[in-house]
Amino acid sequence: MVRFEAVGLRYPGTGPHRGDWGEEALADVTFALPPGSFTWLLGPSGAGKSSVLRLMHLALRPTRGEVEVLGLRTARAPRAALPPIRRRIGVVFQDFRLLPYLSVFDNVALPLRLAGRPEASLKADVTEMLRWVGLQAKALALPPELSGGEQQRVAIARAVIHRPDLLLADEPTGNLDSRQARRLLALLREMNRLGTTVVVATHDDELVARFPAPSLLLHEGRLHDPDNARGPFAAEDDGLAEA
Amino acid sequence: MPRRSRYSRDPLGLRRALSGWLLPGLVAAMALLAALAVAGAQGAAGLADRWQRGAAAAVTVQLPDAARVEPALAALRAMEEVAEAEAIDAARLDALLRPWLGAAPAIPLPALIELRLRDPRADPVLVGDRLAAVVPGAVVEAHGLWVRRLAALARSLQALAWVVLALVAAVAAAVVAVATRAGLAARRDAIEVLHGLGARDADIAGRFARRLGLLAALGAAGGTAAAVPMLALLADLAAPWVGGEAARGLSALPWPALLAVPPFAFLVGWATAQATVRRWLRQLP
Ligand SMILES: Nc1ncnc2c1ncn2[C@@H]1O[C@H](COP(=O)(O)OP(=O)(O)OP(=O)(O)O)[C@@H](O)[C@H]1O
Ligand SMILES: [Mg+2]
């Protein structure tokens, strides 16, 4: 499903040394997530959680090693091979990334329309999804007219509407109160129960405690795996204190 | 409250990002130039063609009076370089000269014979000398030289028109490229979102290309329409040289070429936008 093999990642440098490559944001990250699993992605700020998720939804390619997502080895795959894989992945971004000039309905319908679903069959699905996240009444509103939590629910609806095989969420509870955060988690668990592989990056310890599941712990771009729970590929580590 | 764009037609909000009259206006100005160039090229081609066809028959023999026509014809038909010799009858001559001399000319008109030489490159002066020996007073007038010069001029005008057309197309492509970049900058976030959701480069480039092709075609239609009255006026002025009344006004315009200007502008806009957007998209993984 998702497999990282000795992955290294550098971002292109900016500032005075434009064109140089920066420090490695990820180094020697190795793990594999089985299909249908639920995984927490944990670590302090700047540890590289978002970077790992970006590699998973093909917004980046590794500078070193191999990332395999849904059967595609992305490191050297031709560019044209990526879009079909992206369409099987749902992503909830911390900053939502909704299109501000499209209605809530059209934002949620985006993945279905990109997949070429006919308009007639799509209306019922989108309406049902909006009902599920409790935004039925706001279907025709524009995202800037919504509250932060409402926008987040639109982002979630857009991420799951096409029943992705892989669902990624980056700090999905950042803008939610704890009741809404629990509701969101229930939703992610439901998707997981229906067979979707889910990865959630967070530093909300309370949430993790509420739903214990296997976790990947990152620290300064390296995988911290004290139990060696991820099998023989796991990174050998230098015994970091828990983050 | 801002108007909601309907997704299925405009998921990137390009109607708003690529709007305004600047692009269509610029393309309209260029389409006007293109229409003038096309019409100029066609007009010059017509003139060159006509004059050159005329040049083969453009040897005229002038006789001081009608009595000498028959001996002159006999002498000319006997010469082997002459393919054809025909007297121009008085009525036709009258009609030809009426615009200059009025309905009832007071001066005696000369008699004319039109010659067609077997070999258009043969020197008509030699023919004239031999004819003058038999029929005194016969004068041969060869129009070949100035016709050739005019034809050369017309051909250069035609070549110039094609150069203008190529330049206009290149400038139009540059204008579209600039507009496309502005649109890409304005919709960068939206493009990244669609790209992240799995839109293919062709999806995104196609949206831009259709929009910019449409804007270019609209501008071109306006510019061409504005050119029509000017061209009609020019056609009127050119009519005496190109074939009289039939070539007057709107009917004389090169309609197929003019009608081709907007679709051509669409193609230029479409192709330029495709290339620009696809190149820009390659910076995304
Ligand atoms: N676009 C970028 N350009 C350059 N460096 C980046 C970029 N994004 C992240 N980095 C660097 O990569 C490292 C990991 O960043 P990342 O965003 O993955 O951390 P994170 O674990 O998601 O942190 P947070 O919890 O604060 O979101 C950081 O050192 C950061 O400076
Ligand atoms: Mg992050």
Image (tube, coloured by chain):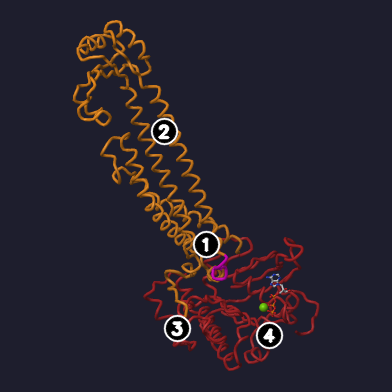
Chain colours: A red, B orange
Say which chain tag 4 marks.
A
Return the mark for residue A203. Answer: 4
Q: Residue B219: within the magenta?
A: no
- The part of the chain drawn in magenta is B185-191
In this view, B209 is above or below A207: above
Q: Earlier in the sequence, mark 4 or mark 3?
A: 3
> What residue is at 26 percent from the left and 17 percent from the top?
B84
Return the mark for residue A139. Answer: 3
Tell me where residue B158 appears, x and y as whole percent: 43, 37
Q: CA distance from mark 4 to mark 3?
A: 31 Å
- In the rendered structure, are the residues bearing label 1 and label 3 in contact, judged by CB atoms less than 8 Å apart? no
Q: CA distance from mark 2 to mark 4?
A: 80 Å
Q: Say which amino acid is labelled 4.
A: His
**SS class, disc 4:** loop
> What residue is at 45 percent from the left and 33 percent from the top?
B156
**SS class, disc 1:** helix
